[in-house]
Amino acid sequence: MSGPPIPFNRAEVSAADLARAAEAVSAGHISGGGPATREAEQLLVELHDGARTLLTTSCTHALELAALLTEPEPGAEVIVPAYTFVSSAAAFLLHGLTPVFVDVRDDTLNLDVDAVEAAITPRTRAICAVHYAGVGADPDRLEALAARHGLILVEDNAHGLGGTWDGRRLGTFGAASTLSFHETKNITCGEGGALVVNDAALVERAEILREKGTDRARFFRGQVDKYTWVDVGSSWVMSDLLAAILVGQMGRLDAIQARRHALWDRYAAGLAGWAAARGVRLPVIPAEAGHTAHMFQLWMPDLATRTQFIDHLRGAGIMAVFHYQPLHLSDVGRRLGGRPGQFPVTEDAGDTLVRLPLFVGLTEADQARVIDRILEF
Ligand SMILES: Cc1ncc(COP(=O)(O)O)c(C=O)c1O
Protein backbone atom coordinates (compact mmCIF):
# COMPACT_ATOMS: atom_id res chain seq x y z
CA MET A 1 0.00 0.00 0.00
CA SER A 2 1.57 3.32 -1.05
CA GLY A 3 -0.58 5.64 1.05
CA PRO A 4 -3.55 5.68 3.39
CA PRO A 5 -6.59 3.59 2.46
CA ILE A 6 -8.97 5.11 -0.08
CA PRO A 7 -12.59 4.20 0.72
CA PHE A 8 -15.22 3.67 -1.94
CA ASN A 9 -17.30 6.49 -0.49
CA ARG A 10 -17.06 8.98 2.35
CA ALA A 11 -20.15 11.08 3.07
CA GLU A 12 -19.30 14.71 3.60
CA VAL A 13 -21.46 16.47 6.17
CA SER A 14 -19.99 19.91 6.86
CA ALA A 15 -19.75 21.84 10.13
CA ALA A 16 -22.30 24.25 8.64
CA ASP A 17 -24.72 21.36 7.97
CA LEU A 18 -24.36 20.25 11.59
CA ALA A 19 -24.85 23.83 12.78
CA ARG A 20 -28.20 23.85 10.97
CA ALA A 21 -29.21 20.69 12.82
CA ALA A 22 -28.18 22.34 16.10
CA GLU A 23 -30.30 25.36 15.18
CA ALA A 24 -33.32 23.10 14.73
CA VAL A 25 -32.71 21.78 18.26
CA SER A 26 -32.39 25.31 19.70
CA ALA A 27 -35.52 26.44 17.87
CA GLY A 28 -37.36 23.55 19.50
CA HIS A 29 -38.55 21.71 16.39
CA ILE A 30 -36.91 18.41 15.55
CA SER A 31 -39.87 16.24 14.54
CA GLY A 32 -41.05 16.46 10.93
CA GLY A 33 -42.97 19.19 9.18
CA GLY A 34 -41.10 22.15 10.72
CA PRO A 35 -39.16 25.03 9.18
CA ALA A 36 -36.25 22.89 7.95
CA THR A 37 -38.60 20.44 6.23
CA ARG A 38 -40.42 23.29 4.51
CA GLU A 39 -37.12 24.82 3.37
CA ALA A 40 -35.69 21.53 2.06
CA GLU A 41 -38.96 20.67 0.31
CA GLN A 42 -39.04 24.09 -1.32
CA LEU A 43 -35.46 23.66 -2.63
CA LEU A 44 -36.50 20.31 -4.13
CA VAL A 45 -39.69 21.80 -5.59
CA GLU A 46 -37.51 24.27 -7.49
CA LEU A 47 -35.60 21.36 -9.03
CA HIS A 48 -38.84 19.68 -10.15
CA ASP A 49 -40.75 22.37 -12.02
CA GLY A 50 -42.82 23.26 -8.96
CA ALA A 51 -44.13 19.74 -8.22
CA ARG A 52 -45.16 19.11 -4.59
CA THR A 53 -42.30 17.29 -2.91
CA LEU A 54 -42.59 15.38 0.36
CA LEU A 55 -39.52 14.49 2.42
CA THR A 56 -39.60 10.88 3.57
CA THR A 57 -37.58 8.60 5.80
CA SER A 58 -35.98 6.91 2.76
CA CYS A 59 -36.25 6.40 -0.99
CA THR A 60 -37.63 2.94 -0.22
CA HIS A 61 -40.49 4.54 1.72
CA ALA A 62 -41.06 7.07 -1.08
CA LEU A 63 -41.35 4.09 -3.44
CA GLU A 64 -43.86 2.50 -1.06
CA LEU A 65 -45.89 5.71 -1.20
CA ALA A 66 -45.71 5.63 -4.99
CA ALA A 67 -46.85 1.99 -4.96
CA LEU A 68 -49.89 2.86 -2.81
CA LEU A 69 -50.70 5.79 -5.10
CA THR A 70 -51.10 3.39 -8.01
CA GLU A 71 -54.17 1.93 -6.22
CA PRO A 72 -53.47 -1.56 -7.53
CA GLU A 73 -56.29 -4.00 -8.31
CA PRO A 74 -55.65 -7.57 -7.06
CA GLY A 75 -53.17 -9.21 -9.45
CA ALA A 76 -51.68 -5.89 -10.61
CA GLU A 77 -48.15 -5.89 -12.04
CA VAL A 78 -45.34 -3.36 -12.12
CA ILE A 79 -42.58 -3.50 -14.73
CA VAL A 80 -39.15 -3.11 -13.10
CA PRO A 81 -35.57 -3.45 -14.39
CA ALA A 82 -33.91 -6.72 -13.39
CA TYR A 83 -30.76 -4.69 -12.71
CA THR A 84 -31.62 -2.37 -9.82
CA PHE A 85 -31.64 -2.06 -6.06
CA VAL A 86 -34.05 -4.37 -4.22
CA SER A 87 -36.32 -1.50 -3.17
CA SER A 88 -37.39 -0.64 -6.74
CA ALA A 89 -39.22 -3.98 -6.74
CA ALA A 90 -39.76 -4.78 -3.04
CA ALA A 91 -41.64 -1.55 -2.29
CA PHE A 92 -44.24 -2.48 -4.92
CA LEU A 93 -44.49 -6.14 -3.92
CA LEU A 94 -45.21 -5.09 -0.32
CA HIS A 95 -48.23 -3.10 -1.51
CA GLY A 96 -49.78 -5.63 -3.82
CA LEU A 97 -48.02 -5.21 -7.19
CA THR A 98 -46.13 -8.17 -8.61
CA PRO A 99 -42.79 -7.14 -10.10
CA VAL A 100 -42.34 -8.18 -13.73
CA PHE A 101 -38.67 -7.89 -14.57
CA VAL A 102 -37.26 -6.80 -17.90
CA ASP A 103 -33.67 -6.55 -19.07
CA VAL A 104 -31.70 -3.32 -19.34
CA ARG A 105 -29.76 -1.74 -22.22
CA ASP A 106 -26.13 -2.78 -22.34
CA ASP A 107 -24.79 0.78 -22.65
CA THR A 108 -26.59 2.61 -19.82
CA LEU A 109 -28.05 -0.30 -17.82
CA ASN A 110 -31.37 1.53 -18.00
CA LEU A 111 -34.69 -0.09 -18.93
CA ASP A 112 -34.86 -1.28 -22.53
CA VAL A 113 -38.04 0.53 -23.64
CA ASP A 114 -38.87 -2.07 -26.33
CA ALA A 115 -38.61 -4.82 -23.71
CA VAL A 116 -40.89 -2.80 -21.43
CA GLU A 117 -43.49 -2.54 -24.18
CA ALA A 118 -43.28 -6.27 -24.84
CA ALA A 119 -43.84 -7.00 -21.12
CA ILE A 120 -47.09 -5.01 -20.85
CA THR A 121 -50.13 -7.18 -20.09
CA PRO A 122 -53.74 -6.34 -19.14
CA ARG A 123 -52.57 -6.60 -15.50
CA THR A 124 -49.79 -4.01 -15.84
CA ARG A 125 -50.51 -1.01 -13.62
CA ALA A 126 -47.17 0.79 -13.42
CA ILE A 127 -43.62 1.06 -14.72
CA CYS A 128 -40.80 1.80 -12.30
CA ALA A 129 -37.83 3.27 -14.19
CA VAL A 130 -34.41 3.75 -12.58
CA HIS A 131 -32.06 6.43 -13.93
CA TYR A 132 -28.98 4.32 -13.30
CA ALA A 133 -25.94 6.36 -12.28
CA GLY A 134 -28.03 9.50 -12.82
CA VAL A 135 -28.28 8.94 -16.57
CA GLY A 136 -31.84 9.33 -17.88
CA ALA A 137 -33.62 6.08 -18.79
CA ASP A 138 -35.22 7.40 -22.02
CA PRO A 139 -37.84 9.07 -19.78
CA ASP A 140 -39.60 10.81 -22.67
CA ARG A 141 -40.19 7.49 -24.43
CA LEU A 142 -41.32 5.85 -21.19
CA GLU A 143 -43.65 8.77 -20.46
CA ALA A 144 -45.25 8.39 -23.90
CA LEU A 145 -45.46 4.61 -23.57
CA ALA A 146 -47.12 4.87 -20.15
CA ALA A 147 -49.62 7.41 -21.49
CA ARG A 148 -50.42 5.24 -24.50
CA HIS A 149 -51.23 2.23 -22.29
CA GLY A 150 -52.82 4.11 -19.37
CA LEU A 151 -50.00 3.12 -16.98
CA ILE A 152 -48.46 5.03 -14.09
CA LEU A 153 -44.79 5.86 -14.57
CA VAL A 154 -42.73 6.07 -11.37
CA GLU A 155 -39.15 7.30 -11.68
CA ASP A 156 -36.81 5.81 -9.08
CA ASN A 157 -34.48 8.79 -9.18
CA ALA A 158 -32.27 7.70 -6.28
CA HIS A 159 -29.16 8.49 -8.37
CA GLY A 160 -30.40 11.37 -10.47
CA LEU A 161 -31.19 14.49 -8.43
CA GLY A 162 -30.52 17.50 -10.66
CA GLY A 163 -29.89 15.41 -13.78
CA THR A 164 -31.60 16.20 -17.08
CA TRP A 165 -32.82 14.53 -20.26
CA ASP A 166 -33.03 16.77 -23.31
CA GLY A 167 -32.86 19.71 -20.93
CA ARG A 168 -35.80 18.51 -18.79
CA ARG A 169 -35.16 17.54 -15.16
CA LEU A 170 -35.10 13.87 -14.24
CA GLY A 171 -37.90 13.18 -11.80
CA THR A 172 -40.46 15.30 -13.68
CA PHE A 173 -41.52 12.71 -16.30
CA GLY A 174 -43.48 10.23 -14.19
CA ALA A 175 -46.69 10.67 -12.20
CA ALA A 176 -44.28 10.53 -9.26
CA SER A 177 -40.55 10.18 -8.69
CA THR A 178 -38.44 9.27 -5.70
CA LEU A 179 -35.11 10.48 -4.30
CA SER A 180 -32.61 9.01 -1.86
CA PHE A 181 -30.44 10.88 0.63
CA HIS A 182 -28.70 7.75 1.92
CA GLU A 183 -25.04 8.33 2.74
CA THR A 184 -23.93 6.87 -0.60
CA LYS A 185 -25.87 9.50 -2.59
CA ASN A 186 -24.63 12.85 -3.97
CA ILE A 187 -26.67 14.75 -1.35
CA THR A 188 -27.14 13.09 2.02
CA CYS A 189 -28.53 13.36 5.53
CA GLY A 190 -27.56 9.79 6.48
CA GLU A 191 -30.88 8.14 5.67
CA GLY A 192 -33.71 9.91 3.92
CA GLY A 193 -35.66 10.36 0.74
CA ALA A 194 -38.39 12.30 -1.00
CA LEU A 195 -41.46 11.72 -3.10
CA VAL A 196 -41.98 14.19 -5.95
CA VAL A 197 -45.64 14.20 -6.96
CA ASN A 198 -45.91 15.48 -10.53
CA ASP A 199 -49.55 14.46 -10.95
CA ALA A 200 -51.37 17.11 -8.92
CA ALA A 201 -54.37 14.80 -8.51
CA LEU A 202 -52.21 12.49 -6.33
CA VAL A 203 -50.83 15.14 -3.95
CA GLU A 204 -53.50 15.08 -1.28
CA ARG A 205 -53.53 11.29 -0.97
CA ALA A 206 -49.70 11.23 -0.85
CA GLU A 207 -49.77 13.68 2.07
CA ILE A 208 -52.30 11.51 3.91
CA LEU A 209 -50.42 8.24 3.30
CA ARG A 210 -47.17 9.77 4.59
CA GLU A 211 -48.90 11.08 7.75
CA LYS A 212 -50.16 7.75 9.16
CA GLY A 213 -53.36 7.93 7.10
CA THR A 214 -54.45 11.25 8.65
CA ASP A 215 -55.35 14.60 7.07
CA ARG A 216 -52.78 16.37 9.26
CA ALA A 217 -51.39 18.33 6.26
CA ARG A 218 -54.87 19.81 5.63
CA PHE A 219 -55.10 20.70 9.34
CA PHE A 220 -51.77 22.57 9.23
CA ARG A 221 -52.97 24.51 6.19
CA GLY A 222 -56.05 25.54 8.18
CA GLN A 223 -58.37 23.64 5.84
CA VAL A 224 -59.92 21.55 8.64
CA ASP A 225 -60.22 22.40 12.35
CA LYS A 226 -58.92 19.03 13.61
CA TYR A 227 -57.17 16.15 11.94
CA THR A 228 -58.40 12.60 11.84
CA TRP A 229 -57.82 9.12 10.39
CA VAL A 230 -59.04 9.10 6.80
CA ASP A 231 -57.09 6.40 4.91
CA VAL A 232 -54.36 3.78 5.21
CA GLY A 233 -50.88 5.14 5.80
CA SER A 234 -47.73 4.92 7.83
CA SER A 235 -45.05 7.06 9.47
CA TRP A 236 -42.85 8.21 6.60
CA VAL A 237 -42.12 11.80 7.65
CA MET A 238 -38.47 12.86 7.85
CA SER A 239 -37.26 14.48 11.09
CA ASP A 240 -36.48 18.23 10.92
CA LEU A 241 -33.07 17.39 12.37
CA LEU A 242 -32.19 15.52 9.17
CA ALA A 243 -34.05 18.01 6.97
CA ALA A 244 -31.81 20.75 8.40
CA ILE A 245 -28.71 18.84 7.27
CA LEU A 246 -30.34 18.40 3.88
CA VAL A 247 -30.92 22.16 3.53
CA GLY A 248 -27.19 22.68 4.02
CA GLN A 249 -26.34 20.00 1.47
CA MET A 250 -28.85 21.33 -1.06
CA GLY A 251 -27.24 24.76 -0.76
CA ARG A 252 -24.01 23.19 -2.01
CA LEU A 253 -25.61 21.07 -4.73
CA ASP A 254 -23.97 22.90 -7.64
CA ALA A 255 -20.54 22.78 -6.01
CA ILE A 256 -20.97 19.09 -5.12
CA GLN A 257 -22.02 18.20 -8.66
CA ALA A 258 -19.17 20.23 -10.18
CA ARG A 259 -16.63 18.44 -7.98
CA ARG A 260 -18.07 15.02 -8.81
CA HIS A 261 -18.06 15.84 -12.53
CA ALA A 262 -14.39 16.90 -12.35
CA LEU A 263 -13.52 13.54 -10.73
CA TRP A 264 -15.69 11.63 -13.20
CA ASP A 265 -14.07 13.37 -16.20
CA ARG A 266 -10.59 12.64 -14.86
CA TYR A 267 -11.38 8.93 -14.56
CA ALA A 268 -12.80 8.92 -18.10
CA ALA A 269 -9.73 10.64 -19.57
CA GLY A 270 -7.19 8.73 -17.47
CA LEU A 271 -8.62 5.28 -18.17
CA ALA A 272 -9.74 5.52 -21.81
CA GLY A 273 -6.56 4.12 -23.42
CA TRP A 274 -6.10 1.38 -20.82
CA ALA A 275 -9.74 0.32 -21.09
CA ALA A 276 -9.65 0.15 -24.89
CA ALA A 277 -6.52 -2.00 -24.80
CA ARG A 278 -7.92 -4.39 -22.14
CA GLY A 279 -11.45 -4.93 -23.36
CA VAL A 280 -12.81 -2.96 -20.40
CA ARG A 281 -15.91 -0.85 -21.03
CA LEU A 282 -16.41 2.61 -19.56
CA PRO A 283 -19.72 4.43 -18.94
CA VAL A 284 -21.65 5.64 -22.00
CA ILE A 285 -23.55 8.92 -21.71
CA PRO A 286 -26.23 9.44 -24.40
CA ALA A 287 -26.29 12.88 -26.04
CA GLU A 288 -29.64 13.73 -24.38
CA ALA A 289 -28.34 13.04 -20.86
CA GLY A 290 -27.14 15.65 -18.40
CA HIS A 291 -25.89 13.11 -15.86
CA THR A 292 -25.14 13.56 -12.16
CA ALA A 293 -21.68 11.93 -11.92
CA HIS A 294 -23.21 9.67 -9.30
CA MET A 295 -20.82 6.83 -10.07
CA PHE A 296 -17.96 5.79 -12.31
CA GLN A 297 -18.30 2.16 -13.30
CA LEU A 298 -16.20 -0.24 -15.39
CA TRP A 299 -17.34 -3.45 -17.07
CA MET A 300 -14.49 -5.97 -16.76
CA PRO A 301 -14.26 -8.74 -19.37
CA ASP A 302 -15.53 -11.45 -16.99
CA LEU A 303 -16.18 -12.36 -13.35
CA ALA A 304 -12.71 -13.80 -12.71
CA THR A 305 -11.02 -10.65 -14.04
CA ARG A 306 -13.30 -8.47 -11.94
CA THR A 307 -12.42 -10.45 -8.81
CA GLN A 308 -8.70 -10.10 -9.58
CA PHE A 309 -9.15 -6.38 -10.27
CA ILE A 310 -10.97 -5.73 -6.98
CA ASP A 311 -8.31 -7.75 -5.12
CA HIS A 312 -5.51 -5.89 -6.92
CA LEU A 313 -6.92 -2.51 -5.82
CA ARG A 314 -7.67 -3.77 -2.33
CA GLY A 315 -4.03 -4.80 -2.03
CA ALA A 316 -3.17 -1.16 -2.70
CA GLY A 317 -5.65 0.00 -0.03
CA ILE A 318 -8.26 1.08 -2.58
CA MET A 319 -11.90 0.03 -2.23
CA ALA A 320 -13.66 -0.64 -5.53
CA VAL A 321 -16.98 -2.45 -5.27
CA PHE A 322 -19.40 -4.31 -7.48
CA HIS A 323 -23.05 -3.34 -7.63
CA TYR A 324 -26.48 -4.96 -8.01
CA GLN A 325 -27.00 -8.69 -8.23
CA PRO A 326 -29.72 -9.63 -10.74
CA LEU A 327 -33.09 -9.37 -8.98
CA HIS A 328 -34.69 -12.16 -11.02
CA LEU A 329 -32.07 -14.56 -9.62
CA SER A 330 -32.55 -13.52 -5.97
CA ASP A 331 -34.59 -15.85 -3.72
CA VAL A 332 -37.70 -13.72 -4.22
CA GLY A 333 -36.99 -13.24 -7.92
CA ARG A 334 -36.82 -17.02 -8.44
CA ARG A 335 -40.09 -17.45 -6.55
CA LEU A 336 -41.57 -14.98 -9.04
CA GLY A 337 -40.34 -17.17 -11.89
CA GLY A 338 -36.84 -15.81 -12.56
CA ARG A 339 -34.31 -18.20 -14.12
CA PRO A 340 -30.67 -17.99 -15.25
CA GLY A 341 -30.17 -16.79 -18.81
CA GLN A 342 -33.39 -14.80 -18.82
CA PHE A 343 -31.81 -11.33 -18.81
CA PRO A 344 -28.30 -11.51 -20.29
CA VAL A 345 -27.34 -7.83 -19.92
CA THR A 346 -28.36 -7.78 -16.25
CA GLU A 347 -26.56 -11.05 -15.56
CA ASP A 348 -23.40 -9.83 -17.29
CA ALA A 349 -23.43 -6.56 -15.32
CA GLY A 350 -23.96 -8.53 -12.11
CA ASP A 351 -20.74 -10.44 -12.85
CA THR A 352 -18.51 -7.80 -14.43
CA LEU A 353 -19.42 -4.30 -13.23
CA VAL A 354 -17.20 -2.55 -10.70
CA ARG A 355 -17.46 0.99 -9.28
CA LEU A 356 -14.49 3.20 -8.46
CA PRO A 357 -14.12 5.51 -5.44
CA LEU A 358 -15.98 8.75 -6.19
CA PHE A 359 -16.84 11.26 -3.47
CA VAL A 360 -16.46 14.99 -2.95
CA GLY A 361 -13.55 14.62 -0.54
CA LEU A 362 -11.48 12.41 -2.88
CA THR A 363 -8.29 14.41 -3.46
CA GLU A 364 -6.62 14.68 -6.84
CA ALA A 365 -3.54 12.94 -5.41
CA ASP A 366 -5.66 10.02 -4.18
CA GLN A 367 -7.53 9.81 -7.47
CA ALA A 368 -4.19 9.80 -9.32
CA ARG A 369 -3.18 6.86 -7.09
CA VAL A 370 -6.36 5.00 -8.02
CA ILE A 371 -5.74 5.60 -11.72
CA ASP A 372 -2.06 4.58 -11.50
CA ARG A 373 -2.92 1.32 -9.74
CA ILE A 374 -5.58 0.60 -12.36
CA LEU A 375 -3.14 1.23 -15.19
CA GLU A 376 -0.83 -1.40 -13.63
CA PHE A 377 -3.54 -4.01 -13.86
C1 LIG B 1 -31.93 2.74 -7.52
C2 LIG B 1 -32.17 2.76 -6.05
N1 LIG B 1 -33.42 2.85 -5.59
C3 LIG B 1 -33.69 2.88 -4.29
C4 LIG B 1 -32.69 2.83 -3.35
C5 LIG B 1 -33.06 2.84 -1.90
O1 LIG B 1 -32.73 4.06 -1.28
P1 LIG B 1 -32.88 4.25 0.29
O2 LIG B 1 -31.69 3.63 0.92
O3 LIG B 1 -32.92 5.75 0.49
O4 LIG B 1 -34.15 3.62 0.72
C6 LIG B 1 -31.37 2.75 -3.77
C7 LIG B 1 -30.30 2.68 -2.76
O5 LIG B 1 -29.15 2.62 -2.99
C8 LIG B 1 -31.09 2.70 -5.15
O6 LIG B 1 -29.83 2.58 -5.62
Image (cartoon, grey):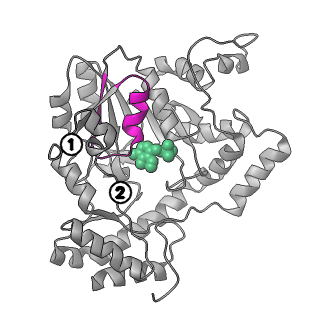
Q: Is residue 304 above or below residue 209?
A: below
Residue 107 location (% of width, % of height):
21, 54
Say whether residue 232 is left or right of residue 106. Answer: right
Q: Secondary structure at mark 1?
A: loop
- Say if mark 1 contacts mark 2, CB within 8 Å: no
Q: Foreground residue, 109 or 1? A: 1
Which labelled disc corresponds to residue 323? 2
Res 41 → quadrant: top right
Q: Which residue is at a point 74% across and 50% down the rendered structure image? A: 21
Residue 246 location (% of width, % of height):
62, 48
Say whether residue 342 is left or right of residue 349. Answer: left
Q: Looking at numbered disc 1 in the image, what kind of residue is underneath it?
A: Asp
Residue 93 location (% of width, % of height):
38, 29
Q: Which residue is at a point 81% across and 46% down the rendered structure image? A: 25
Q: Foreground residue, 188 or 35? A: 188
| Magenta stretch holds residue 93 | yes
Quadrant of the frame with the N terminus? bottom left
Res 139 → quadrant: top left
Q: Which residues are magenta?
A: 77-97
Res 197 visible: no
The numbered mark, 1 or 2, whose residue comes first in the sequence reads 1
Q: Which residue is at a point 37% across and 78% down the rendered structure image? A: 313
| Magenta stretch holds residue 368 | no
Q: Secondary structure at mark 2?
A: loop
Q: Is residue 30 above or below residue 122?
A: below
Residue 351 location (% of width, % of height):
25, 59
